[in-house]
Image: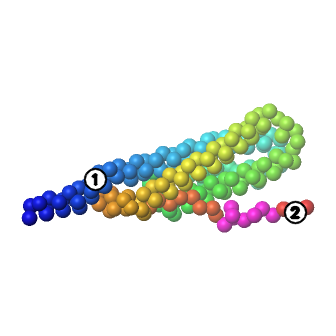
Amino acid sequence: MKKILLILLLVIVLPFFYLIVTNYNNIPKLDENVKEKWSQVQNQYKRRADLIPNLVETVKAYAEHEKSTFVEVTEARSKVSAININENTLNNPALLQQFDSAQAGLSSALSKLMVVVEKYPELKANQNFQALQSQLEGTENRISVARKDFIEAVKLYNLELRTMPGKLVAAIVHPEAELKETFTASPTEQEAPKVKF
């Protein structure tokens, strides 16, 4: 009887224990990776928000009568700044969507500002404006990369929670672990631009 219990222990319990021990840290590591990637997204959005006042002031000097566009950009930036974002945002789909919507509004307002710029060739030739526009374009690219990295980190985390052995380990030693939300494109972002000639 002792031999049978020992064999059962070796065949069933030991592999189960090994599975738990070897995969115990995967979920916390992946969770921290998601938080780090989210911080990078926030960092790039902050960089963009910091560039906007300088860009608006430069354009204002050339196009004073385009006041409504400046107001729209300033209000969109204020909405983005008003949303308090932290790591708990990742567990709150409604707040994540609110943040994403505010960022989309800011992107839309910036697009309108760039349309204003097209009307003023002398502004487009201004070195300060060119430098700010280049920084803004670079920041938009960084935002895109940071969002892509965040989406990938969320995917890996969620896969760990939904597949074996991660699902089993999470149920036993990390019951607080929940699937995380990621970015989704709004209906307006999914529409193809209308081209008129």
**First in sequence: mark 2 vs mark 1:** 1
Mark 2 crowdedness (10 Å alpha carbons): few <14, some 14-19, many ≥20: few
Task: Please give the residue where the numbered disc 1 appears in the rendered image.
Answer: 18
Q: What's the amino acid at mark 2? A: Lys
Q: Position of residue 44 (x, y in %)?
A: 59, 44
Q: Residue at x 78, y 37 (%)?
A: 130
Count the numbered circles shown: 2
Q: Position of residue 177 (x, y in %)?
A: 38, 58
* Label 2 sits on residue: 196
Here the colouring is rainbow
Gap between marks 2 and 1 measured at Cα = 64 Å
143 and 160: which is toward the camera: 160
> Where on the picture, by quarter, is residue 72?
bottom right
For this rendering, which residue is in front, 194 or 4?
A: 4
Label placed on residue 130: none
Instruction: Look at the image and say whether residue 188 sits in the magenta stretch.
Output: yes
What residue range appears in magenta? 187-194
Look at 81% across and 64% down and name the residue there.
194
Q: Is residue 177 visible?
A: no
